[in-house]
Amino acid sequence: CALGKGSRGWWLALGTSMIGLFCLGMAGPSSAGIGNEAPYRVLPAIRRGNLTIFPVVAAKSYNTSQLLTLDEGIRTGEVVVTEAGSERGLVRGDHGDHPVPYRGGAEVNRLVLYNNSGRPLLLLAGEIVTGGKQDRVIGADRIVPPKGGPMDLNVFCVEPGRWVESSAKFGSMAAQMAQPSVRTPAMVEQNQSEVWDRVRASNAAMANSLSASESRGDVARTSSYAKVFASPPVQAKLEEYGGHASEEAILSELRSKGAVGVVVAVSGHVEWADVFASTELLAKYWPKLMRSYVAEAMTSGSSGGTAEMSEAQTFIGNLNGGREIAETEPGVFRRTETVGEGYRVFTLHGLSAGSDFDVHITKMTD
């Protein structure tokens, strides 16, 4: 571990991953800016009940075809996630297949990931992996280099009460992402107790929203966030927002307008934004993102109010703040947290030759 002062601020090198931490004090213009142009512009709203989605278009988009998603990697078997302390089995490298042991015991907030593909792997905060001793949610955006691993993965449990292995390897919950109120404590406070509190609150709110007492009881007895949202009564409740057909219709509209992201309002309050480097990258994540927004709307406990387009534009138009902290893995990515008055912005910027741009931006209200 080394500590020093570089030209941009204090830096810290940790282990072999060489992740630098920069505390930059007063933040300058957002890295999302493109020259003097406004980088993002919102379009008229798409409304579903108390959920309002404003498409976001960009002054510039990028080629993101080289990026592999977690769902794609797990589906093909090229990405493997295990508990810390588990033995991976075979890692494919330049010298053939060979077993790689990973020493140490399982931990709530640490998993081990292998990217055996030839493409950089994009991980988003809020993605859920199921299995192992507990279901987990990824706590921070990052890019994993090709043929990378074993590497520690920062995670938070979203299944309080279980510590019994259900499977040796984790699968991705391709149909659902953690809703904004669950993602926030993982990304900001990085506090496991806060994540559990939000999971319990969300599960309870979802159970209370169901009409059939028997179904409500079944959901109320389930501690797993993933299992609650995968349950038939909750899936039926999700259909009230249009279900799969609505997801497809909205995605078609986003594609036709060249949208690269969305600003999300619940019950008239603008709360969240997810913006990507391209329309295609947004499209890959859209089904699980849409369901996370619907989950937020369903568990908000409020149904009134309408957000205006001007509010959404103001929200996405201000990505600056009074304080900025950055973490860097040289040559791979830089992750920046910008703190403003009443909001935070998280920016993942690629640093490789093929991805030297802002890959994903998240903005949330505090």
Image (cartoon, rainbow, N blue to C red):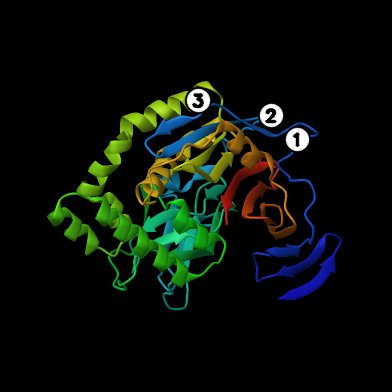
Q: Quadrant of residue 49?
A: top left
- In the displayed orientation, state which residue is furthest to the right: 7
Q: Where is residue 110? Give x, y as percent.
A: 48, 69
Residue 102, numbered circle: none
Give me the disc on residue 34: 1
Give the quadrant of residue 65.
top right
The span from disc 2 to disc 1 (Cα, nearest Å) is 7 Å
Left or right of 276, for residue 12:
right
Which element is circle 1 on? Answer: loop
**Amino acid beneath label 1:** Ile
Q: Is residue 235 left or right of residue 95?
A: left
Is residue 135 in view? no
Q: Which residue is mark 3?
A: 255
Which of marks 1 and 3 precedes in the sequence? 1
- Give the crowd class for mark 1: few <14, some 14-19, many >=20 residues within 10 Å: few
For the N terminus, give its image quadrant: bottom right
Q: Amino acid at mark 2?
A: Ala
Q: Disc 2 marks which residue?
A: 59
- Quarter of the figure with the C terminus: bottom right
